[in-house]
Image (spheres, rainbow, N blue to C red):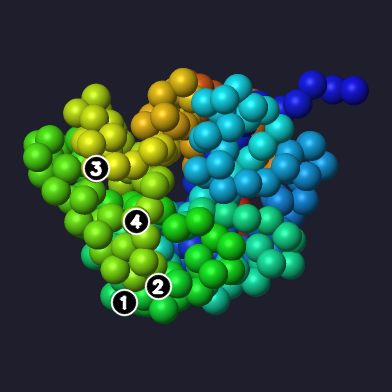
Amino acid sequence: MSPPRPPLALAYHGVAAVRLRDDTYSLFTRPATLRRQIQVLRRWGYRFTTFGDLAARVQRGEGDGYAALTFDDGMADNHSTLLPVLRDEGVPATVFVATAYIGGRHPDVPEVPMLEAADVVALRDGGVEIGSHSHAHRDLTTLSFDEVLADLRRSRRALADVLGEEPTVLAYPFGRASEETRRAAREAGFAFAARAEAQGNWDDPWDQPRQDMHSYSGRLGLWLKRDNRYEPIMRVPFGRIARSGGRRLKRLVR
């Protein structure tokens, strides 16, 4: 019997059938692709849980063999498209909501609507963990400690107004966090906080690593990310060239 896989947190954004050539920021994963990735992870022996539960398990030394699907920003398709996929597949997930975006439009893709407050409630009631993605979605490492603390507290209050309870998990905008950022997350009341691009350290509850999932992410990429090999490969010239070529090819096909 093979040993359990290492803990794995994957960072997605939207779930929609957007053509790669139209997905300028690589924010959308097709529903069918997400289903295949869930099934692959199952074949690899993973059990699914929320980000908060995964982080807590890791702190207890019980995280091996568990994976968490997380979705940043709070796009409306997280309710309309993602939630049915999660129900069909029988898996939980975590949606990190930037509270300034609720009821609005995505700043990078203005044609994309964001979750309404009622949608956030419906996701929570559907078994999805709701976390904060800050309030204004600014790079927190560029702000003072007091500014970060104020933003994070504002996001917790805004979600408490919607859900009746404050969130306990946070995903840093752009996955960026300094020592001061992490300290602010602790003081704001978050139990766990997530990075991106494989940055962070499982030993630190406020610096938990996630692997980014993009519109062009395939099974090979998922395999490399599972073992935390993708980002190191992409830091060398050959890896960057291979990734760029693969993206261009997929955009021509899709």
Q: CA distance from mark 4 to mark 3?
A: 11 Å
Disc 1 designates what residue?
A: 103
Q: Which residue is mark 3?
A: 188
Q: Is residue 105 visible?
A: no
Q: Residue at x 52, y 44 (%)?
A: 51
As measured in the structure, the alpha-carbon distance from the residue carrying label 4 to the one carrying label 2 is 18 Å
Q: Are marks 1 and 4 in contact (CB under 8 Å)?
A: no
Closer to the camera in the image, 190 or 120: 190
Q: Are marks 1 and 3 in contact (CB under 8 Å)?
A: no
**Alpha carbon distance from label 1 to label 3:** 24 Å
Q: What is the distance, in whole Å, between disc 3 and disc 2 at their CAs?
A: 24 Å
| Rendered residue at 55%/60% (across/down) | 128
Task: Give residue 113's quadrant in the image.
Answer: bottom left
Q: Position of residue 92 (x, y in %)?
A: 62, 55
- The residue that mark 2 highlights is 115
Q: From the viewer's perspective, is 147 left or right of 199?
A: left
